[in-house]
Image: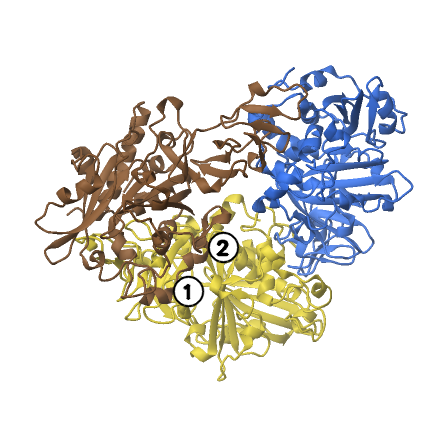
Chain colours: A brown, B yellow, C blue
Amino acid sequence: MLTKEENERLTKVGAGTPMGETMRRYWLPALLSWELPERDCPPVRVRLLGEDLVAFRTTDGEIGLIDEFCPHRGASLWLGRNEENGLRCVYHGWKYDVTGQCVDQMNEPRQFCAKIRVKAYPTFESGGIVWTYMGPKEKQPPLPNFAWTQVPETHREASKVVQACNWLQALEGGIDTSHFTIMHRALRKNSRQPGIEIDSPGVRGRAPTLEVDVTDYGYAYFGIRPMGDGSNYVRGYHFIMPFTQLRPPGPGMNQTHGHYWVPMDDETCMVWNFYASYDKEPLGERSSNSGNGYGTHVDVKNGFRPTRNRSNDWMIDRQMQKTETFTGIDGINQQDRAVQESMGRIVDRTRENLGPADRAVVATRKLLLEAVDTVQRKGDPRGTGSSYYELRAAEAVLRDDIDWRRELLPAMYPQTGGADRSRREPKVLEEAAPPDAGKP
Amino acid sequence: MLTKEENERLTKVGAGTPMGETMRRYWLPALLSWELPERDCPPVRVRLLGEDLVAFRTTDGEIGLIDEFCPHRGASLWLGRNEENGLRCVYHGWKYDVTGQCVDQMNEPRQFCAKIRVKAYPTFESGGIVWTYMGPKEKQPPLPNFAWTQVPETHREASKVVQACNWLQALEGGIDTSHFTIMHRALRKNSRQPGIEIDSPGVRGRAPTLEVDVTDYGYAYFGIRPMGDGSNYVRGYHFIMPFTQLRPPGPGMNQTHGHYWVPMDDETCMVWNFYASYDKEPLGERSSNSGNGYGTHVDVKNGFRPTRNRSNDWMIDRQMQKTETFTGIDGINQQDRAVQESMGRIVDRTRENLGPADRAVVATRKLLLEAVDTVQRKGDPRGTGSSYYELRAAEAVLRDDIDWRRELLPAMYPQTGGADRSRREPKVLEEAAPPDAGKP
Amino acid sequence: MLTKEENERLTKVGAGTPMGETMRRYWLPALLSWELPERDCPPVRVRLLGEDLVAFRTTDGEIGLIDEFCPHRGASLWLGRNEENGLRCVYHGWKYDVTGQCVDQMNEPRQFCAKIRVKAYPTFESGGIVWTYMGPKEKQPPLPNFAWTQVPETHREASKVVQACNWLQALEGGIDTSHFTIMHRALRKNSRQPGIEIDSPGVRGRAPTLEVDVTDYGYAYFGIRPMGDGSNYVRGYHFIMPFTQLRPPGPGMNQTHGHYWVPMDDETCMVWNFYASYDKEPLGERSSNSGNGYGTHVDVKNGFRPTRNRSNDWMIDRQMQKTETFTGIDGINQQDRAVQESMGRIVDRTRENLGPADRAVVATRKLLLEAVDTVQRKGDPRGTGSSYYELRAAEAVLRDDIDWRRELLPAMYPQTGGADRSRREPKVLEEAAPPDAGKP
């Protein structure tokens, strides 16, 4: 449970708000590289942290990301002409380069370009994503070189979809391991619907205990499900500040999957999905099979909006819900989006009742509030270094008497050899035990 | 005419508002029984007095009506699974019974169900309707056993449709007998459009005089239309607090028709229509013929929204309006809805000009404001007893020299033998004479 | 650049606002004559200056323009019956004549019509347009007898289309001559897309110098484009207070074209287009060819809303934009509407950067602010006389050494013989030189 003030502090991301200023201290995924397929191609609208921007790829191949509106009289530069290393407003022909500098004014007999600039943000391409940084220049962190972005293009995939709710409730749904084997399960063997198999360890196991290891980048967390046969099914994740999750792909796969939950504005977020294989084999078709590919789920031409949404009740199929899957909604990610959107655009956290299974949710809020404080005190919040570069997710079914940290950490911290990076921060950990309803 | 403050006092129905608290002292129609066709069928959304609720029929056949949102983290329980005498949230598998008690928490190793409740309201089925009571337990009135609900299922019918305006302007249109023979008339004999026949007593008669007899349940009211031949056409209605009308079905029919105008929220109401026959013969197809059946008028699958609505100008047909019907809009109830919606979501009653023909409207406001005062003074408002159970509506064409009260009251109060139940409350009656423009 | 206060002062037009009261001192185009094609035809909704009105043509041929809502109980009179020299509300049959006087009350046994009036505005038909005046009776200006309305019906044409932004940014786009040969140009010879030919003087010439001659009706203004061959291409326009533009039709044509940008409310305006030929020949099909006819651009049955609009990105064609036209948007007027709507409903003028090419824009704001002041000081603002009746627009390509004013003014002021009517008002002119960024 949060106070009304805390809930606003965590959810509002406009320029000048506490969380807005905090978000502006991190690199953000802005758009997919293929949305700008070639030099001088049409510009693309980008909405980030409540700001309307426009992206374009120049004749020289650079990527500009600038204010959508021309500083002359306010026409949309999205209507503009992308030509000769700049984006030209169609209204009076004023033109801007990737730095935001005005370089031409077709309508003026004596030009005064030098006096005119449009807001522009730096960009960086990696992992098939165009990243941007919207904060103060002197605070720009190292480039967002997540491990998954470093594998060959054949071994990774990224996609995105608009979600009609605040970024934090999407994030809180994502890092919430306890729902995973409940909401996403199939109800019978060999169902043709995507879902977690009823004979999988996750469904067979009991409700998980959660452990959270706070680190300098956020935290590692673990869901431990007793299997009732002297073993535990342990899944190890990372939460990287402020909105990144790395998760294990399923037993026996040498991959990392993950999400970015990026605020478009206070009431809308972009959910990014990524997949990377560390095997020799390319990634193959797996992502589409798991419901994350575009297929029929996302209307790419309509700004990556989902075809299943609140206006059509996420196309829930009540017969399917009786016999095939727990929700009756088609697709794993669609199920997450449906419950999160069903809460309203910004859920009222003053009314919730958390339990021990919500420990990761509580820890996240603590770290986010801490980051806001740090930024307000002119400091550098967690996760603005580069220590998260190496991270991977891992999972295993292990006998009760085995120290699962010792087994999983080497795979989760491959470059630092599995050293436990937990900072043992009792203040965060202790309070992360939910105080609301379910204290054991 | 009302002051701005009075208009708000009468129209706003959220929890904690004066009228909202008053409405919560009565049984309310919540949904049709057939919307929950069988045990363990899918849950149904219900919006009442600004609250979002969800209804479900259990394995044992009971009906639950609870808050739409799970008290754990706020997911919609409408997405839930209705199984084994409870509604289960698909997010983390928390489950609630019809009393709102949490009875399972799939995601918690050590459950704390006893501490968790969701808001729940009692329900009652009668007349093909599921009723609920949303007020304080100790104030719960007798069950809503309207006479029409007591006839066999073959002799009654209920339906509903969403109207895009405040409940009070729908109610004021309904109890407004003077428009009936004007707005709803056909322009020529044997028109194929539904409408009041031009040779009917209502159309042939002159503009009616209104009489209002205030009672303990609301009032009986009478429209007396001089026929110009030494007779009067008298229609006798009941208004039962706070939103019920009983009306006569037309000359020579032993039936009662009626409406409930139930607030969904401040700007939307559900118009309920009901018909009951007191004859030996079943009701037959009459209701559909009079434009109240579903036919093509209501999009049942889209939450009972009307197909003719503001966005399509109620499909007004101007040629039809020239030659067939007064409005050019198809269907009696559709005509009412069109004019009432055309006033805006909440009509500005500071600008109106009432006349003597609006006497019932004025009386209604007096009684509603009185009820609000009564509730604020911790009393029991009119209409919370059971004295309205017996009521029926009646009409007749009677010679001038006949006391029409003596003729109609026995049919309108069949169990108490036609005794005049009017309370002769000069304060209400006197002020019910509209002060605005038309004082004779 | 304006202050926030100035921007609101100029853009808000509701009753009681400074600009709203100023606008109410002029005759306004309300609807097209053909929207009321015959006597007793159906009434038509009109939205003007934030007021909802309804227009009707009576049995005697007069045109009424009255409040949309019946003063009895607020039903929409648009649903009404237009019959026997009055508009009758379908709810209770109250009827109003063109003066707003209530003349019948079907539902009242003893009528009190004399006490009931509905708001009504005077109307005047001219040029195929129904005009109205919404201000104080004693301030009503001479009738709007623009020269173009005085030619035979075969020699003129008027049309209209809704634009989804404030009236002022539509006006500012219209009087902005410098964008004309940039935004509207074709990219190659003989393109099948409408556009200004690349070998036309406007495109071949250099960016124009602007001159503004302030007058008693507003101003005349001139765009002077050096052709680089010892000649100038000079276009002479008029701006008539508060929202009228007359513009030359293109070289060698004896016509005047123009626009009215009329506020429907703060966030929507009606763009009126008109064309008149002063030749012996009728107007012919020219207007349609130039993209202003209805064709497929305007959904007349849907309230004159454009088919190309923000919701479909004005159907921009990026391939067309590469090779055929500067914008890739089909139609000259559609291009204007697209850029103006792209700025948002009310553009933020505190963020703009004006240059010398925006001199007419600056002058307009000066005159509008002056008019607001004049009205507040109980005076009569510019343009409320009749001195604008004679005005026409003109253009020519002229040698450098020719005084273009001497050449153009006789055509622009045909009745007063070309006398220079400029008032040499240094205060307006001087400040009209944009102070923002581009001072030479």
* Sequence-first disc among 2 and 1: 1
In this view, the residue in front, A34 or C158, is A34
In the image, residue A389 sits, relative to residue C402, either above or below, namely: below
Residue found at x 79% / y 22%? C229
Q: Which residue is denoted by mark 1 in the rendering? A: B31
Q: Is residue C313 above or below residue B370?
A: above
Q: What amino acid type should be assigned to the residue bearing mark 1?
A: Leu
Q: Is residue B397 left or right of residue A128?
A: right
How far separated are the C-alphas under marks 2 and 1? 15 Å
Counting from the top left corner in percent of width and height, residue C281 is at 90, 43
Q: Residue A324 appears in which quarter of the rendering?
A: bottom left
Q: Nearer the viewer, residue C379 or C318?
A: C318
Query: x and y percent of residue B295 in the render?
Result: 55, 70
Residue B224 location, x and y as percent? 62, 68
How would you rate the neighbour count of disc 1 (Cα within 10 Å): few for under 14, some for 14-19, many for 20 or more?
A: many
The x, y position of residue C424, in whole percent, is 78, 17
Q: Chain of mark 2?
A: B
Q: Residue furthest bottom?
A: B280
Q: Quick one: SS at disc 2? A: strand
Q: Residue at x 45, y 61 (%)?
A: B241
**Visible in this render: residue A265?**
no
Q: Nearer the viewer, residue C332 or C24?
A: C332
Q: Which residue is mark 2?
A: B268
A385 relative to A309, above or below:
above
Discs 2 and 1 carry the same chain letter: yes
Residue B382 has which mark? none
Q: Is residue B299 left or right of residue A405?
A: right
Can residue A379 be seen in the rendering of this structure? yes
Q: Residue at x 60, y 76 (%)?
A: B251
Element type at marker 1? strand
Amino acid, disc 2: Thr
